Amino acid sequence: MLHPVDHSMNTIVRSVASPSWFCLRTQPKREHVAAVNLRKRVQIEVFAPRLRIWRSTRHGIASLITEALFPGYIFARFLHPDQSRHVLSTTGITGIVAFDGRPPAVADPVIDFLRNEIEQAGRNAGEPLLEEGSWVRIATGCFHDMEGRVLHFDPQAGRVRLLLMLLGRTVRVNLPARGVTFASAPHAHYPPGLLARPEMSA
């Protein structure tokens, strides 16, 4: 005896289907462009994590630049396989990351974690990461163009304590970290026992 086909279960499955996060490959150095194209063309949620970081140039000067956290990759939230064709045909996208032909979904908590990390990193991106012992040049203020050694860097306060040679004497100064850039090899010699010297602020 034949029974009528019950389509109610298929209807329920379709109705509760929800988009998932997937990792996409992009053209080199086109992560941001690919993300913009996906939002406009497919109208889906995209996460293209980028970091603002300090990089030292070949001249030793620190510069704040923006880079992709995962070069060549971004994340997008969509229905697979329903929207995959539209995603893959978007300018800047070269493929979906897959294993054995199956693209694994990225769990929501992973994306949330990455977003929180990016947000936290953005709060601390305003200052260069100056390590103790780094040789630096002062770019602003009354000590402009002088060079010295980093004694201590406080990223939370955005201040750096330097050891300078001033009028034939070695002194410590406390400056805003934004006014300091990396320099080449040192030209001054500092004798030992300088940490007891008085500190000047600017």
Image (cartoon, rainbow, N blue to C red):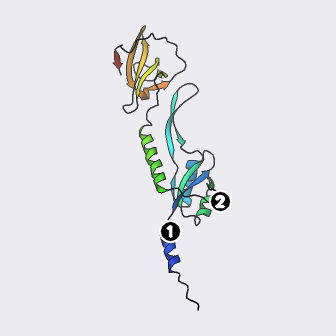
Residue 89 in sight here: no
Residue 116 percent coordinates (x, y): 43, 47
Quadrant location of the C terminus in the rendered image = top left
Residue 193 percent coordinates (x, y): 40, 11
Q: Residue at x 45, y 24 (%)?
A: 132
Residue on which disc 1 sits: 17
Mark 2: which secondary structure? loop
Residue 133 in sight here: yes
Residue 161 percent coordinates (x, y): 40, 22
Residue on which disc 2 sits: 101
State the residue in front, 49 or 137: 49
Q: Which residue is drawn at 62% across and 59% down?
A: 88
**Residue 134 to residue 64: above or below:** above
**Residue 22 to residue 155: above or below:** below
Which amino acid lies under the numbered mark 2 shown in the image of this protein? Gly
Give the residue at the far front of this rendering: 1
